[in-house]
Image: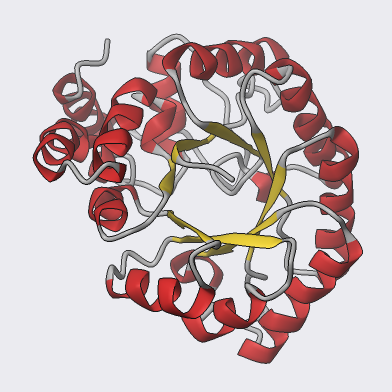
């Protein structure tokens, strides 16, 4: 359904933590103009863990409204309770989102059977294309390729975002999930190679700052142009690393604010980027040719 650079959009906030509607408008327009393939609204980079359920649904609706059909919108609707994930996914469908992205249930550390039954229950409850999201470094559980393969047999589970950084999984996922199943990297640093190995795109933090460059890199990688993709990725490599000098989305929200696209707002328990962490992010922005 989707190809190329998909931005894991930040949720812009004022300094007092209120969601910034004008900032959302600027960001959606920015990504349309810069050629981003799709927007993920209220994914984990969008601080889904600090928004209550009403706010979560409201931001999804607003991004769909602002996109106005100009760019596909994928709604982040994962939760650590299956019933909550169903409710959020229903919100996404009613809002008119093109698909939903569901992070594996965090903290609970479910078994592989629990992960299978969780995603199966959401898929059967809500008729919307759904993308699995595996990020064990944040959730403390790992959706194994074999379980993804089982889930790929459910008609409206259409892809997976794999943020393990394990490039050996690309071939395993392709073999177990079949050709019609979309594979997205969730790790910017290894995304170029992920696509050269047969992946279909990246759901990206870096794309918040350098969307056009990310899309150009993805286009080269998806067409098998290793030389061009590597050249473009070299300009982005500093951002891939510097945007994780502190917990995501702390560095990327600071950088977006530096670019004048959003105010300096983030919600506790997340805090603003500390001054000692600013130099590497600034240097990476310069390397990528950003203001």
- Seen in the picture, residue 154 relative to 223 is either above or below; the reply is below
In the rendered image, residue 284, in percent from the top left (x then y), is placed at 19, 29
Residue located 35% across and 21% down the image: 212
Q: Which residue is nearer to you in this view: 174 or 24? A: 174
Residue at the image point whose x is 35% and y is 69% from the top: 170
The relative height of residue 120 versus residue 59 in the rendered view (above or below) is: below
Is 156 placed left or right of 104 in the picture? right
Specify whether residue 83 is in view.
yes
The quadrant in which residue 94 appears is: top right
Residue 179 percent location from the top left of the image? 48, 65
- Foreground: 287 or 124? 124
- Identified at 82% across, 43% down, the residue is 92
Residue 263 visible here:
no
Q: Residue furthest front?
A: 179
Q: Quadrant of the C terminus?
A: top left
Q: Is residue 14 left or right of residue 233?
A: right
Count up the numbered dots. 0
Using the image as rendered, state which of residue 145 and residue 253 is in the foreground.
145
In the picture provided, is 46 more to the left or to the right than 233? right
Q: Nearer the viewer, residue 14 or 140?
A: 140
Describe the colour scheme in one phrase: secondary structure
Of the 4 image quadrants, the one containing the N terminus is top right
Percent x, y of residue 221: 25, 43
User: What percent of the width, then of the height, locates residue 235?
Assistant: 15, 30
Relative to 123, does residue 191 appear above or below in the rendering? above
**Res 43 quadrant in image:** top right
Residue 48 shown left or right of residue 81 in the figure: left
């Amino acid at each position: 359904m989707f190809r190329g650079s998909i931005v894991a959009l930040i949720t812009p906030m004022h300094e007092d933590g209120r969601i910034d509607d004008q900032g959302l408008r600027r960001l959606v327009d920015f990504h349309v103009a810069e050629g981003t393939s799709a927007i993920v609204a209220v994914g984990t980079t969008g601080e889904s863990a600090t928004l209550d359920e009403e706010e979560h649904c409201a931001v999804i609706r607003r991004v769909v409204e602002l996109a106005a059909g100009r760019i596909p919108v994928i709604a982040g609707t994962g939760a650590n309770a299956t019933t909550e994930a169903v409710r959020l996914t229903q919100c996404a469908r009613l809002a008119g989102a093109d698909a939903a992205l569901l992070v594996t249930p965090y903290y609970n550390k479910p078994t592989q059977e629990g992960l299978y039954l969780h995603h199966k229950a959401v898929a059967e409850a809500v008729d919307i294309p759904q993308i699995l999201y595996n990020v064990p470094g944040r959730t403390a559980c790992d959706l194994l390729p074999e379980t993804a393969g089982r889930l790929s047999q459910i008609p409206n589970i259409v892809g997976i975002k794999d943020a393990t950084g394990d490039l050996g999984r690309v071939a395993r996922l392709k073999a177990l999930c079949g050709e019609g199943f979309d594979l997205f990297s969730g790790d910017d640093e290894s995304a170029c190679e992920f696509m050269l190995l047969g992946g279909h795109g990246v759901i990206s933090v870096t794309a918040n700052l350098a969307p056009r460059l990310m899309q150009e890199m993805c286009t080269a990688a998806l067409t098998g142009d290793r030389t061009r993709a590597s050249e473009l990725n070299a300009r982005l490599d500093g951002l891939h690393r510097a945007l994780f000098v502190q917990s995501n989305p702390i560095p990327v929200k600071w950088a977006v604010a530096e670019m004048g696209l959003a105010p300096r707002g983030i919600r506790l328990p997340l805090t603003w980027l500390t001054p000692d962490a600013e130099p590497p992010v600034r240097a990476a922005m310069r390397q990528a040719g950003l203001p």
